[in-house]
Image: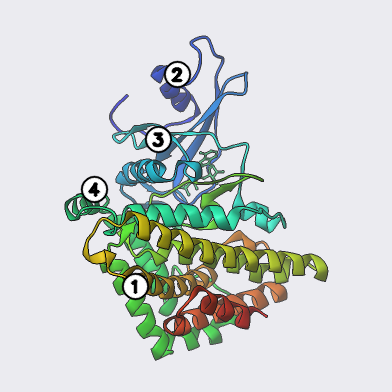
């Protein structure tokens, strides 16, 4: 099978069987589709001995909208290639690619089904001790080893070309930086939020900051980003953390991935106000989330600076103090992008279940007001943040 055709349970099973790589020849296989993301098909193929693989296939359109939103199949190549590149420098936190077919837009991945998607776990009030350290390790290693600090100029330029991802970047550009700040039919928020949304649209200082963040997203190819680091892209268990789904990957500003992740922890923090009624349980979850953010920021900074001190190949970039200065700017970007994630997930097209599952309208609205305010303040105050502690203190001052 080589020309593109969308697979179903039967053809996905045959495809894996014909590869003959993952199961014994006489294995009795079954297959079902269970994707719950916005864009793609995800099948599990398993035998009777508990062996299994995941087959992910891109459709020529966005699954959540349908054929009226055509979308490049090339995103499957990008996703598999980012996973391989990130796996080369951080195998412990990257889902393993077992096979890829660009024509069919099919990728076969290790089955992480014995772990769980982080968003659902946080929504249920479950916590993971190593989450902050693991995410920081993944983001520090992947962002450092694909940056100009480490790669030669020629290697970097070739990779920037290989990972040019205009259609998926355009979705992010629209959803993060345009839609929430103007009237657009894709936006999705309750009428009761209209006054606060109008104030955002009229806030000139905010709009300038959004323009600067968008400009950096367009033209700051600092590293090979994952491009969609939300809590639905992270598998967790008590001991392990693994990233999936980097189809939005491209060379962009380092702060985008870290900011998106922290934004998702803050969305969950605010959502817990509407989800958990017992105050002590809510307090524990809040302090876990804040502690995880603090660990993540500090570990990212420590690991990045250690890598810069020990592995910087570029001669100019070895200048004493340059890595620290570079990282301070990354931190300010992180805070800005974190704010844009909070805002776009509250009033834009793609929401989060953390908030949408809150049944009580009054409680949900209070959470939405908090995420909008927090997002706005993070963006407005990003440039006055000079250290990870400044960033952390600012978060505390708006969530307490
Ligand atoms: N490697 C994997 N192992 C187990 N389940 C997976 C794996 N990859 C994806 N899934 C499941 O499929 C769902 C959708 O996958 P995702 O990559 O997020 O799709 P999309 O690109 O459509 O957002 C995930 O939430 C998860 O439940
Ligand atoms: C129509 S794409 C909207 C949204 O969905 C993506 O997330 P995922 O595919 O992981 O569910 C990404 O965050 C996009 O912004």
Q: Earlier in the sequence, mark 1 or mark 2?
A: 2
Q: Which quadrant of the figure has residue 275?
A: bottom right
CA distance separating discs 1 and 3: 42 Å
Left or right relative to 302: residue 178: left
Dots 1, 2 in contact, CB < 8 A? no
In the rendering, which numbered label is found on residue 162?
A: 4
- Whether the residue carrying mark 2 lies under 8 Å from ligand 1 is answered with no
What percent of the width, then of the height, locates residue 374?
56, 79
For marks 3 and 4, give the one nearer the viewer.
Answer: 4
CA distance separating discs 1 and 2: 55 Å
Can residue 350 be seen? no
CA distance separating discs 4 and 1: 32 Å
- Quarter of the picture containing the N terminus is top left
Q: On the image, numbered disc 1 is attached to which residue?
A: 321
In the rendering, which numbered label is found on residue 156?
A: none
Question: Which secondary structure, mark 2?
Answer: helix
In the rendering, which numbered label is found on residue 107?
A: 3
For marks 1 and 2, give the one nearer the viewer.
Answer: 1
Q: On the image, numbered disc 2 is attached to which residue?
A: 17
Can residue 108 be seen? yes
- Whether the residue carrying mark 4 lies under 8 Å from ligand 1 is answered with no
For marks 2 and 4, give the one nearer the viewer.
Answer: 4
Near mark 4 (Cα within 10 A), the count class, few <14, some 14-19 or many ≥20, is few
Q: Is residue 215 above or below residue 134?
A: below
Question: Which secondary structure, mark 1?
Answer: loop
């Amino acid at each position: 099978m080589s020309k593109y055709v969308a697979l179903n349970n039967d053809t996905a099973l045959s495809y894996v069987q014909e590869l003959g790589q993952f199961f014994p020849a006489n294995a009795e296989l079954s297959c079902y589709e269970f994707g719950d993301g916005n864009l793609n098909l995800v099948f599990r193929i398993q035998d009777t001995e508990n062996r299994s693989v995941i087959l992910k296939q891109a459709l020529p359109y966005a699954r959540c909208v349908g054929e009226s939103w055509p979308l490049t199949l090339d995103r499957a190549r990008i996703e598999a290639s980012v996973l391989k590149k990130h796996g080369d420098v951080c195998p412990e936190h990257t889902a393993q690619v077992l096979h890829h077919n660009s024509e069919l837009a099919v990728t076969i991945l290790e089955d992480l089904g014995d772990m769980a998607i982080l968003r659902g776990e946080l929504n249920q009030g479950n916590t993971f001790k190593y989450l902050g350290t693991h995410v920081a390790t993944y983001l520090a290693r992947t962002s450092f080893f694909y940056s100009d600090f480490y790669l030669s100029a020629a290697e970097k330029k070739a990779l920037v070309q290989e990972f040019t991802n205009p259609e998926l970047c355009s979705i992010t550009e629209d959803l993060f930086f345009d839609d929430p700040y103007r009237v657009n039919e894709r936006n999705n928020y309750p009428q009761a939020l209209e006054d606060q949304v109008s104030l955002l649209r009229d806030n000139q200082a905010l709009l300038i900051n959004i323009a600067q963040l968008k400009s950096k997203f367009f033209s700051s190819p600092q590293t090979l980003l994952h491009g969609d680091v939300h809590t639905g892209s992270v598998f967790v268990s008590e001991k392990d953390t693994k990233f999936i789904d980097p189809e939005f990957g491209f060379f962009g500003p380092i702060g985008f991935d870290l900011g998106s992740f922290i934004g998702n922890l803050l969305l969950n923090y605010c959502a817990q106000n509407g989800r958990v009624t017992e105050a002590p349980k809510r307090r524990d979850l809040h302090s876990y989330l804040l502690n995880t953010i603090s660990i993540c920021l500090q570990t990212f900074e420590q690991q990045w600076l250690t890598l810069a001190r020990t592995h910087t190949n570029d001669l100019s970039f070895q200048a004493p103090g340059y890595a620290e200065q570079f990282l301070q700017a990354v931190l300010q970007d992180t805070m800005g992008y974190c704010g844009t994630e909070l805002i776009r997930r509250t009033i834009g097209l793609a929401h989060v279940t953390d908030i949408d599952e809150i049944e009580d309208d009054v409680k949900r609205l209070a959470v939405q007001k908090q995420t909008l305010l927090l997002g706005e303040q993070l963006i407005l105050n990003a440039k006055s943040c000079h250290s990870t502690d400044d960033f952390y203190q600012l978060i505390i001052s708006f969530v307490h």
